[in-house]
Amino acid sequence: MLVLVVSALLFSLSSNLDNIVVGLAFGIKKIHLDAVSNLTVAVITTTGTVIAMLFGKWLSGYLPDRIGNELGAGIIILLGIYFVIQGIIKLLKEKKSGSYAMKSTDEMAEKMDASVRDKSHIRYREIVTVALGLTFNNLGTGIAASITGVNIVLTAVCTFMISLIALWLGSRLGGRVVGPLLGDYAPAVSGVLLVILGLIEMFW
């Protein structure tokens, strides 16, 4: 049971680090994010994750247990390594250009600033677009995680709760020094969490 909970938490944390980055972008540009908008993002991302995991569970029915588990875990580990390498490369480029711990989050903020018409309050259509973007980022890992046997119900609950917290936290930290720093490290941290999850699913 403990392994199931840990796996669900690791997957949910990794999947929702992007929510923190988006929240940071809102905070930097002082775009108001109300409770309904936050809830909308949580519902859409959780629904997308569940659909991906249900597909993964269906797919695992056509694979021998051992092969399915190792295949899913292997994909998760490879995705994690890719995210870590991608994050490190981005950090090195930013450090070299002198924009360390600021560039990626500021770029996201500029995109938000350009897409949101009313800077004091984001429209429902705009928040749905943001939520769908976050959801598509999680589809591949959701399928792979489900193939390895990560519990769908636990993951749905964790994803929903962590999504709410991550977006809210990001929006509150957006105007502070720690915000952009956290945003720049998010991809690498997400990758590390995925690698740990993959190893747990492969050996436990």
Image: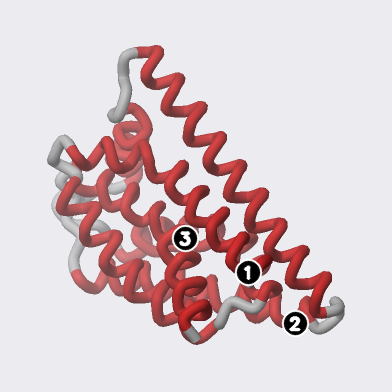
Viewer-proximal residue among 199 and 124 = 199
Q: Residue at x 41, y 81 (%)?
A: 157
Residue tagged by mark 2?
Answer: 58
Q: In this image, 165 relative to 107: left or right?
A: left
Element under disc 3? helix
Q: Residue at x 16, y 56 (%)?
A: 32
Q: Nearer the viewer, mark 3 or mark 1?
A: 1
Element under disc 1? helix
Where 142 sits versus 116, above or below? Answer: below
- Identify residue type, mark 3: Ser
Q: In this image, 43 relative to 180: left or right?
A: right
Residue tagged by mark 3?
Answer: 15
The reply to whether residue 114 is in sight is no
Query: Which part of the image, by quadrant, shows the C terminus?
Result: bottom right
Viewer-proximal residue among 56 and 28 = 56
Q: Which label belongs to residue 130?
A: none
Where 88 sits versus 176, above or below? Answer: above
Where 176 sits versus 6, above or below? Answer: above
- How dense is the environment of label 3, judged by Cα within 10 Å: few (below 14), some, or many (20 and up)? many
The answer for how far apart the CA atoms under marks 2 and 3 are is: 21 Å
The first of marks 2 and 3 along the sequence is 3
Element under disc 2? helix
Q: Residue at x 43, y 47 (%)?
A: 189
Give the residue at the far top of this rendering: 97
Q: Contact (CB < 8 A) between labels 2 and 1?
A: no
- Identify residue type, mark 2: Trp
Q: Which label belongs to residue 201?
A: 1
